[in-house]
Image: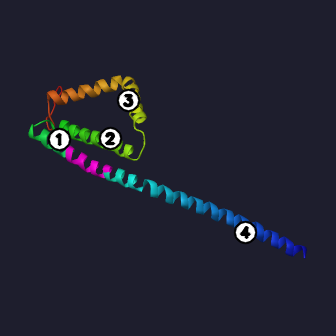
Amino acid sequence: MLAENEQNTLVEKTSGLLKNEIDQVTGFYQLVLDFFANYSFQLVGAFLIFLLGYFVAGKFGKMVLRVCERQKLDVTLSRFLANTTKMLVVVMVTIVALSKLGISVTPFIAAIGAISLGASLAFQGLLANYAAGFNIILIRPFVVGDTIEVHG
């Protein structure tokens, strides 16, 4: 009879634990349903904004590349300007999509500004070399395909 009472107690404990876990899963399921019911249109809207913006960024990049080629700019400079334009448009579209989700982008933009200032101060020498290379591309003392001969 003692073993039977222990079995009943064990069954009651197991059933209590199982009921507790089922309640937790049900609560999580309800939380997910509530989240998607409240924010599904914002998620879809942000996703569509990002996809459309990425498509527009690609078109802007190609347009800048065509304009640069029409003006007979250097190939390196043309591709650099096209890729930079595309990246800037994608960053702006990402910020718009994040704001559509309800995320405050003001601290994010302030953090980008602070990081940019710190990085520019840390990489002054590297940025000076980068600017010198950009200057060489602009004044074009030589172009892609030229051969340079040094002391024979």
- State the residue position of label 4: 15
Q: Is residue 133 visible?
A: yes
- State the residue position of label 2: 91
Residue 40 at x, y percent in the picture: 41, 56
For the point 35% across and 23% down, which residue is it?
Answer: 124
Q: Earlier in the sequence, mark 2 or mark 3?
A: 2
- Residue 95 badge: none
- State the residue position of label 3: 113
Measured in 3D between alpha carbons, the distance from the residue under mark 3 to the one under mark 4, in whole angstroms, is 57 Å
Q: Earlier in the sequence, mark 3 or mark 4?
A: 4
Measured in 3D between alpha carbons, the distance from the residue under mark 2 to the one under mark 3, in whole angstroms, is 14 Å
Q: Earlier in the sequence, mark 3 or mark 1?
A: 1
- State the residue position of label 1: 64
Q: Earlier in the sequence, mark 4 or mark 2?
A: 4
Report the predominant secondary structure element of the magenta stretch: helix
User: Relative to residue 109, is residue 8 drawn left or right?
Assistant: right
The residue segment tinted magenta is 49-60
Measured in 3D between alpha carbons, the distance from the residue under mark 3 to the one under mark 1, in whole angstroms, is 26 Å
- Give the amino acid type for the residue marked by disc 4 in the picture: Ser
For the point 85% across and 71% down, which residue is it?
Answer: 6
Q: Residue 63 lies in what quarter of the image?
A: top left
Residue 54 at x, y percent in the picture: 28, 49
Measured in 3D between alpha carbons, the distance from the residue under mark 4 to the one under mark 2, in whole angstroms, is 53 Å
Q: Earlier in the sequence, mark 2 or mark 1?
A: 1
